[in-house]
Amino acid sequence: MEIRRIKAQTVTDTVKKLFMDCNYFIGKDIMCALENARSNETSPVGKSVLSQIIENDIIAAKEEIPLCQDTGMAILFVEYGDKVVIEDSCFEDAVNEGVRLAYTDGYLRKSVVSDPVFDRINTKDNTPAIIHTKIVSGNQIKITAGGKGFGSENMSAIKMLTPSYGIEGVKKFILDTVRAAGPNPCPPIVVGVGIGGTFERAAQLAKKATFRPIDTANEDERYAELESELLTEINKMGFGPAGLGGDTTALGVNIETSPTHIAGMPVAVNICCHAARHASAVI
């Protein structure tokens, strides 16, 4: 396979479109889940809230305006072909230029501050993006982009469990994290879970899990059953849409796993609100 050269401008244009699209257009999987939840919701208030969320998403798409005022921090999962060369700039700079243009030209709220503790000065263009890159075989670049709001991000957690905790310890930590979050992450939520790897790998897996369509299940039937069980238990908590009570606290639970050390069992929970913004493209 020959080396393929891709202009940096192509990357920038793709990233710009992805971030504008994911902030304006809710995914079909989320919309379908919201409609199903509304049909099955027994709480009149919960049903009303779900109707308002659906109406909001329809208006956002029609008028091409943000689904939510918190248009998130820019996150990208990239599968970068080993036969690709970027011309005229480096890949990271091209990505950040796309983010800058999306948030400026698309009238998306700019929420990033340059220093996390002391200065906290807004960068005014929502950069820098957080880029997770995996080198793969091939001459293409697949980009999955999402804007992660912090009302839900702040409710996330990680715990370095040891193997002695077993499956029950894993379930308890996940459910305790969602229970502690309560109504704060704007339910109905999507719960991303990462199990295994190391401290940072588990957190990355949990974030990646929130990008997976919620109408899919883990390929391992054991984890698929665990996803279903956790979703049932979370919805029994009764926080309901907008935290006002009801049957629909979560729309989905997605689990991603990775091999880990014999002495560890890291578990991360990344909570995402119903405005689960993500979009993909292949260059």
Image (cartoon, grey):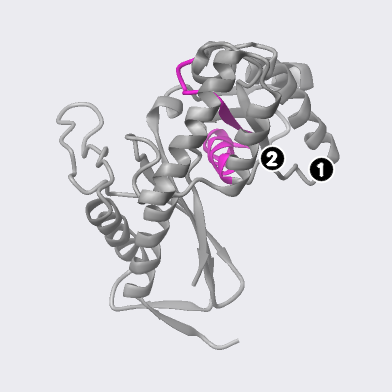
Q: CA distance from mark 2 to mark 1?
A: 10 Å
Q: Considering only vertical position in the picture, is 2 above or below 18?
A: below
User: Which mark is in front, 2 or 1?
Assistant: 1
Observer able to see residue 64: yes
> Which residues make up the magenta segment?
183-211
In which image quadrant can residue 8 be found?
Answer: bottom left
Observer able to see residue 78: no
Local SS, label 2: strand
Discs 2, 1 touching: Cβ within 8 Å: yes
Is 265 situated left or right of 145 in this image? right
- Kindly identify the residue that appears in the image at 63 percent across and 46 percent down: 213
Q: Which residue is the extreme one toward the bottom?
A: 2
Q: Amino acid at mark 1?
A: Asp
Image location of residue 170, percent across then percent down: 70, 21
* Mark 2 burial class by Cα count in 10 Å: few <14, some 14-19, many 20+: many
Q: Considering only vertical position in the picture, is 89 above or below 172?
A: below
Q: Circle 1 sits on which residue?
A: 220
Image location of residue 151, percent across then percent down: 40, 25
Is 165 situated left or right of 59 in this image? right
Image location of residue 148, percent across then percent down: 42, 39
Seen from the viewer's position, the closer of residues 79 and 106 is 106
Seen from the viewer's position, the closer of residues 159 and 213 is 213
Image location of residue 83, percent across then percent down: 53, 78
Q: Circle 2 sits on which residue?
A: 257
Q: Is residue 186 magenta?
A: yes
Q: Amino acid at mark 2?
A: Thr
Q: Considering only vertical position in the picture, is 136 above or below 53?
A: below
Local SS, label 1: loop
- Kindly identify the residue that appears in the image at 53 percent across and 21 percent down: 48
In which image quadrant can residue 147 be found?
Answer: top left
- Kindly identify the residue that appears in the image at 38 percent across and 69 percent down: 11
Seen from the viewer's position, the closer of residues 174 and 203 is 174
